[in-house]
Image (cartoon, helix red, strand yellow):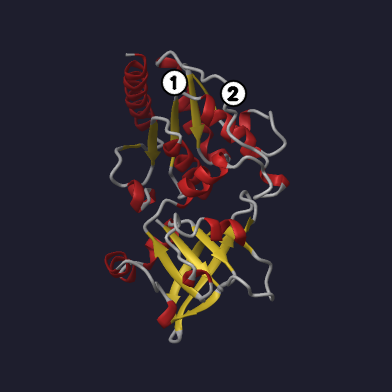
């Protein structure tokens, strides 16, 4: 699922426009738990044809949603990792994104039961040129590069607090007779997404740590599923697993010595199983 915000740049969305054109079951669930909206990627854009704003969409997240008497106040945080998307591209994808022409010309906030990143990825993969996204997005999957049957791609936050987790993952990968890499360990492209797409394409298995609800990791996990690549999900807190992924089994871990030893063993077992299945 994803949030669609049209004609909103933060502030307040009128009560009658909040969760407009949203499936009734989804709407009812979200009205009882606004925090769930913070787990969803957001596609934010001006109304099509509104000359007062640049006609591009942005991907980001919301950090808070609160009733304020007139409607619902929220804060949108753009993710700078993703380049602006021309509204002409969104118009081309309105069917796949479940928006519809009317939805692009009316200020409202909707939630769509669609995988936003899978749609955008399919569009990018099918594009013959990079002109739809501009020079900053002239990065694509290196389809002419062979896959590495021993490579594990690790997608996780790059902050220092995760270094000990990555060390445990490296140990588990080595125990399984494999090797691993994450995007901050290589520099092959000017654009970081070039390195991410390269790792995902070449990998046999992907490990994605969802701890902290990191938007970049969510996006990368979406890319891995869309390719598809066998993906092992990790988290320190089950509450960090977004709604769309809760039906997929994951490994929960802690940071204590014993907890990390358990993660190492469980991850080694899962990696071994997936590699054996691929080679069968």
**Quarter the C terminus occupies:** top left
Q: Nearer the viewer, residue 89 or 77?
A: 89
Query: Quick one: SS at disc 2?
Result: loop
**Quarter the N terminus occupies:** bottom left
Q: Which mark is residue 144?
A: 2
Q: Viewed as shown, does residue 194 lie left or right of 126?
A: right
Residue 109 position within the rendered picture, expressed as x and y whole percent measured from the top left: 46, 71
Q: Is residue 137 above or below residue 65?
A: above
Instruction: Give the image quarter of residue 261.
Output: top left
Rendered residue at 41%/22% (across/down) = 172
Q: Marks 1 and 2: which is nearer the front?
A: 2
Lower sequence index among marks 1 and 2: 2
Assess disc 2: are there few (<14), some (14-19) or many (≥20) residues with their C-alpha within 10 Å of its C-alpha: few
Please name the residue that numbered disc 1 is placed on: 173
Residue 33 position within the rendered picture, expressed as x and y whole percent measured from the top left: 33, 66
Rendered residue at 39%/50% (across/down) = 240
């Amino acid at each position: 699922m994803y949030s669609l915000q049209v004609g909103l740049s933060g502030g307040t969305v009128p009560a009658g426009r909040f969760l407009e054109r949203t499936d009734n079951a989804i709407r009812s669930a979200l009205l009882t738990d606004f925090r769930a909206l913070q787990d969803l990627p957001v596609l934010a854009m001006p109304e099509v044809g509104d000359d007062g704003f640049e006609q591009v969409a942005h991907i980001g997240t919301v950090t808070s949603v609160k009733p304020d008497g007139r409607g619902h106040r929220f804060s949108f945080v753009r993710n700078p990792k993703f380049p602006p998307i021309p509204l002409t591209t969104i118009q081309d994808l309105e069917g796949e994104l479940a928006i519809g022409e009317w939805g692009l010309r009316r200020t409202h906030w909707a939630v769509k039961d669609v995988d936003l990143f899978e749609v955008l990825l399919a569009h990018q993969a099918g594009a013959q040129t990079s002109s739809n996204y501009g020079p900053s997005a002239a990065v694509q999957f290196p389809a002419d590069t062979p896959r590495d049957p021993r490579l594990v791609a690790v997608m996780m936050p790059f902050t220092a607090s995760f270094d000990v987790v990555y060390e445990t993952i490296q140990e588990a990968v080595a125990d399984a007779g494999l090797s691993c890499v994450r995007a901050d360990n290589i520099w092959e492209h000017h654009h970081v997404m070039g390195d991410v797409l390269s790792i995902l394409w070449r990998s046999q298995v992907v490990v994605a740590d969802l701890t902290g609800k990191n938007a970049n990791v969510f996006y990368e996990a979406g890319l891995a599923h869309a390719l598809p690549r066998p993906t092992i999900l990790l988290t320190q807190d089950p509450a960090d697993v977004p709604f769309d992924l809760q039906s997929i089994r994951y490994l929960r871990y802690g940071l204590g010595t014993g907890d990390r030893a358990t993660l190492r063993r469980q991850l080694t077992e899962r990696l071994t199983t997936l590699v054996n299945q691929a080679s069968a």
